[in-house]
């Protein structure tokens, strides 16, 4: 059996698979598949092995969604460090040794087809376990079926057309049989959706034994993933994309791998899936998270409570908004990379503080009136790079008497909850009394910018990723880690609003779900905000105008959670957005006059071919039935 597995994997996915020995990924001291499924205990270990292939979402160096796009940028100290994800943003992706290679594995990625093989092995054998009841067997099989769907989806989102690994081939398979080709996009989507429909039947409604089962999948997770799948499939990258219209496979029938015509019905299908997912999540008790100020132990202003609601929606583990968390991915190093040095002297060696947020990300947040800074009729956009002194009116967000940029004044609460910058309050750090604030001071020589490698290249930090309970002091950092939220309810609401708008245009139902997300951030609804404060008040009343609003709402609400990377691709906006220069403040300035000058940092590179990952060249040589991704 082991020889059979390796035979077809090597032919299909190339010589790189030699680095993945089958016995390395089964439970300890278990030599054969037959032994694994003789007992419940070892079968359960095998199920957990299948879960272990989930991507390392919090590994910013290797997983591409942080440094691989334009949402975070490393500092000069990191230039020579091995960061495969960062090489993607710099334009160094290639076909010889692709960065973050999740097809065959390597260069920061892990071979996902190995995970699919193990899913099939589990499904073929779980029925043999003697010391399990039928209910438990059905549930575990449903979990494996879900994971099989997820790994297919993960590959589909990266590569587009992929081989569908519906079952493990028998040991008698010929060489020709194992050289399978990619399936068309629509076939991939339909197959993944069918797996999710199959899985949801026997998945639990909710996790009951939270002490031992957090992170395992439920009906809500399966339906939410189906919603994400179908929204992705309906989006411009995969729905009638003219750039891919002539791209065919290398199979004997040379089928077209991408749909050549736009199909609006795909948005209806996505809309229905989103609605069903939301209904399932609500029935299971998921809801938009609001912070309970009683936990602070001190009186708190509405502004602080809103900030804590926004930050803890991501950082508070097992909160009711999170639909699925990956317990194998805990945000530890990721927090340290985004935490500025907040206390004096040189003992905070654990505060890595080497990631910065580009200025264009800071500029995408709304004003306090809930509209873009370039549209607010009360906000001076042309003077945004000028400076002024902070008054006591802003003391809950900025340091009184401090000089900072106009860009940092009169912004929505998500701006202050998600970002740290020169002169900003960093709430938490073990101090939850508003009368004892901690501030970021980031000019050259100040606390956040006086270390050889611990500084932001842009002058902004991703505060959103740092748990308010994480404490740094002059001597140490105590990280309050949290499991990574793979899917949360606000994400699902905005996917639903997007599908509604694309299918039927603006309407009360569409606005409802956007406004639910905005309300938590302390903002009025879209129609009210645009009518009262936008120089383009009619924008929400057209499909095109509302599309731009929904896209921006997603970029703001889901910032630093790995969604921007994929959203810009599926919308076919990455080429125009990611190629914009990375800029920030002049971090070499010691005075406000010198510091608050816009400085060019780098120009990321995104070509049309970068919408999809390349298949490693050696994989194509091993299997002539495979075809390279478009443009590569």
Image (tube, grey):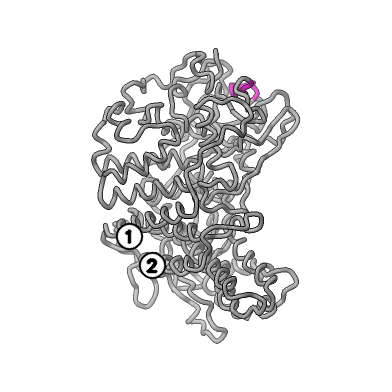
Local secondary structure at mark 2: helix
Q: Residues within 10 Å of mark 2 (few under 14, many from 20)?
A: some
Q: Which quadrant of the structure image shows residue 190?
A: bottom left
| x then y, percent, for residue 431 | 65, 27
Which residue is at the front of the view, 192 or 610?
Answer: 192
First of labels 2, 1 by sequence position: 2
Query: Which mark's residue is nearer the viewer, 2 or 1?
Result: 1
Q: Residues within 10 Å of mark 1 (few under 14, many from 20)?
A: some
Q: Which quadrant of the structure image shows residue 170?
A: bottom right
Q: Is residue 538 above or below residue 383?
A: below
| Quarter that holds the C terminus | bottom left
User: What residue sits 72% from the left and 76% below the top?
Assistant: 31
Is residue 142 in the magenta section?
Answer: no
| Image mark count | 2
Q: Is residue 220 above or below residue 252?
A: above
| x then y, percent, for residue 26 | 67, 70
Residue located beneath label 2 in the image: 190
Quick one: which residue is furthest to the bottom in this view? 172
Q: Which residues fall within the magenta stretch?
A: 436-447
Q: Is residue 557 visible?
A: yes
User: What residue sits 52% from the left and 14% below the top?
Assistant: 392
Kindly identify which numbered label has been placed on residue 330: none
Residue located beneath label 1 in the image: 269
Which residue is at the front of the view, 398 or 620?
Answer: 398
| x then y, percent, for residue 51 | 60, 62
Which residue is at the front of the view, 361 or 70?
Answer: 361
Local secondary structure at mark 1: helix
| Dominant secondary-structure state across the stretch colored magenta | loop
**Whether label 2 touches label 1, CB < 8 Å:** no
User: What residue sits 55% from the left and 21% below the top?
Assistant: 423
Mark 2 → mark 1, Cα distance in angstroms: 11 Å
| x then y, percent, for residue 248 | 35, 68
């Amino acid at each position: 059996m082991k020889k059979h597995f390796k035979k077809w994997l090597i032919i299909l996915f190339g010589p790189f698979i030699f680095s993945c020995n089958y016995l390395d990924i089964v439970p300890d001291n278990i030599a054969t598949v037959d032994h694994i499924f003789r007992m419940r205990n070892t079968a359960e270990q095998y199920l957990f092995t299948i879960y272990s292939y989930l991507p390392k979402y919090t590994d910013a160096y290797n997983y591409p969604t942080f440094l691989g796009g334009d949402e975070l940028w490393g500092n000069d100290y990191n230039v020579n460090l091995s960061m495969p994800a960062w090489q993607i943003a710099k334009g160094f992706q290639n076909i010889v040794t692709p960065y973050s290679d999740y097809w065959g594995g390597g260069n920061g990625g892990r071979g996902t087809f190995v995970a699919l093989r193990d899913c099939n092995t589990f499904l073929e054998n779980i029925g043999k376990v003697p010391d399990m009841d039928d209910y438990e067997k059905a549930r575990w099989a449903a979990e494996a079926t879900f994971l099989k769907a997820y790994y297919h989806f993960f590959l589909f989102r990266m590569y587009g057309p992929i081989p569908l690994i519906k079952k493990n081939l028998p040991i008698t398979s010929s060489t020709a049989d194992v050289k399978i080709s990619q399936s068309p996009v629509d076939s991939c989507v339909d197959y993944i959706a069918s797996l999710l429909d199959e899985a949801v039947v026997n998945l639990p409604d909710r996790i009951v034994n939270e002490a031992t089962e957090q992170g395992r999948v439920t009906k809500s997770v399966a339906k939410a993933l189906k919603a994400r799948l179908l929204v992705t499939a309906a989006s411009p990258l995969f729905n009638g994309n003219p750039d891919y219209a002539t791209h065919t496979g290398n199979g004997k029938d040379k089928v077209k791998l991408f749909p050549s015509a736009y199909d609006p019905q795909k948005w209806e299908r996505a809309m229905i899936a989103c609605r069903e997912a939301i209904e399932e999540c609500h029935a299971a008790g998921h809801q938009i998270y609001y912070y309970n100020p009683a936990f602070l132990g001190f009186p708190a202003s509405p502004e602080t409570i809103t900030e804590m609601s926004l930050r803890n929606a991501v950082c508070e583990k097992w909160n009711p908004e999170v639909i699925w968390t990956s317990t194998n991915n805990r945000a530890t190093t990721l927090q340290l990379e985004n935490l500025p040095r907040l206390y004096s002297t040189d003992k905070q060696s654990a505060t890595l503080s080497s990631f910065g947020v580009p200025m264009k990300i800071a500029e995408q947040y709304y004003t306090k009136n809930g509209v873009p800074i370039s549209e607010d009729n009360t906000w001076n956009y042309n003077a945004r790079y000028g400076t002024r002194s902070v008054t006591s009116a802003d003391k809950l967000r900025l340091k009184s008497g401090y000089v900072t940029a106009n860009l940092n004044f009169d912004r929505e609460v998500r701006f202050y909850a998600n970002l740290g910058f020169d002169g900003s309050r960093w709430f938490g750090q073990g101090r939850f009394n508003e009368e004892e604030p901690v501030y970021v001071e980031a000019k050259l020589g100040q606390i956040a910018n006086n270390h050889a490698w611990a500084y932001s290249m842009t002058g902004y930090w991703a505060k959103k990723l740092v748990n308010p309970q994480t404490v740094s002091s002059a001597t140490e950092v105590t990280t309050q880690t949290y499991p990574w939220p793979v899917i949360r309810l606000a994400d699902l609401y905005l996917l639903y609003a997007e599908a509604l708008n694309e299918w039927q245009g603006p309407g009360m139902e569409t606005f409802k779900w956007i406004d639910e997300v905005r309300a938590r951030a302390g903002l009025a609804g879209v129609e009210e905000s645009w009518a009262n404060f936008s120089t383009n008040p009619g924008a929400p009343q057209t499909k095109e105008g509302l599309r731009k609003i929904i896209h921006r709402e997603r970029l703001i609400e889901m910032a630093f959670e790995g969604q921007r990377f994929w959203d810009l691709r599926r919308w076919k906006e990455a080429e125009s957005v990611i190629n914009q220069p990375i800029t920030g403040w002049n971090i070499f300035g010691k005075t406000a006059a010198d510091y608050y000058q816009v400085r060019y940092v780098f120009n990321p590179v995104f070509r049309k071919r970068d919408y999809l990952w390349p298949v490693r060249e050696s994989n194509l040589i091993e299997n002539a039935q495979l075809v390279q991704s478009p443009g590569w």
